[in-house]
Image (tube, helix red, strand yellow):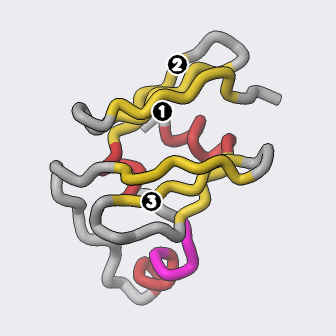
Amino acid sequence: MVVPVEITDHRLSGVLEITWSDGQHSRLHHALLREQCRCAACEQQRRHGSGIPRPDPTLRLERVEPVGEHGLNLAFSDGHDRGIYPWAYLRELSAL
C-alpha cells in the first residue's frame, strides 16, 4: 500500500503537496479538493442534480488534520470542514 511520507500545504499558492512512499508527488489545488469533496452533504447535492458550485479560485485550506492512518480531514476557507479524504482518494485525485 502506498502511503504519504511528506505533506506540505502551500497556502499562498493554494496547493497541497504530497510525497508518496513510492516516490511519486501529488500537487492538489485547494479548489480541486473542495470541488471533489465526498462528504455526505456534497454527495447529496450531486445526487439531487445541483452539483457542487465551482469554488472561488482564492479558496484556501484553513486546516489539514490527519484522521488516524486513513487520510486527511480538510477544512476550507468557505467554512466547509466535513470532508475526509482517504489516502487512496487523494492519490486518485492527483491523476485529474
Query: Residue 95 location in percent, x, y?
Result: 48, 33
43 shown above or below 76:
below
Q: Mark number for residue 75?
A: 3
Q: Position of residue 74 (x, y in %)?
A: 50, 55
Mark nearer the N terminus (1 vs 3): 3
- Foreground mark, 1 or 3? 3
The quadrant where residue 75 appears: bottom left
39 magenta-colored: yes
N-terminal label among 2 and 3 = 2
**Which residue is rendered at x = 60% and y = 60% of the image?**
84
Crowdedness near tag 3: few (<14), some (14–19) or many (≥20) residues, C-alpha within 10 Å: some
- Mark 1 and mark 2: span between their CA atoms? 11 Å
Label 2: element kind: strand
Q: Main secondary structure of the magenta part?
A: helix
Residue type pointed to by label 1: Ala
Q: Amino acid at mark 3?
A: Ala
The crowding category of the residue bearing disc 1, from other C-alpha atoms within 10 Å (few below 14, some 14 to 19, many at least 20), is few
> As shown in the figure, which amino acid type bears the numbered disc 2?
His
Screen quadrant of the C terminus: top left
Mark 2, mark 3: which one is toward the viewer?
3
The segment highlighted magenta reads: 38-42
- Seen from the viewer's position, the closer of residues 13 and 26 is 13
Give the percent coordinates (x, y) of residue 51: 34, 75
Q: Which residue is mark 1?
A: 95
65 magenta-colored: no
Measured in 3D between alpha carbons, the distance from the residue under mark 1 to the one under mark 3, in whole angstroms, is: 22 Å
For label 3, the SS is: strand
Q: Residues within 10 Å of mark 2 (few under 14, many from 20)?
A: some
Per the rendering, the mark at residue 25 is: 2
- Which comes sooner in the sequence, label 1 or label 2? 2
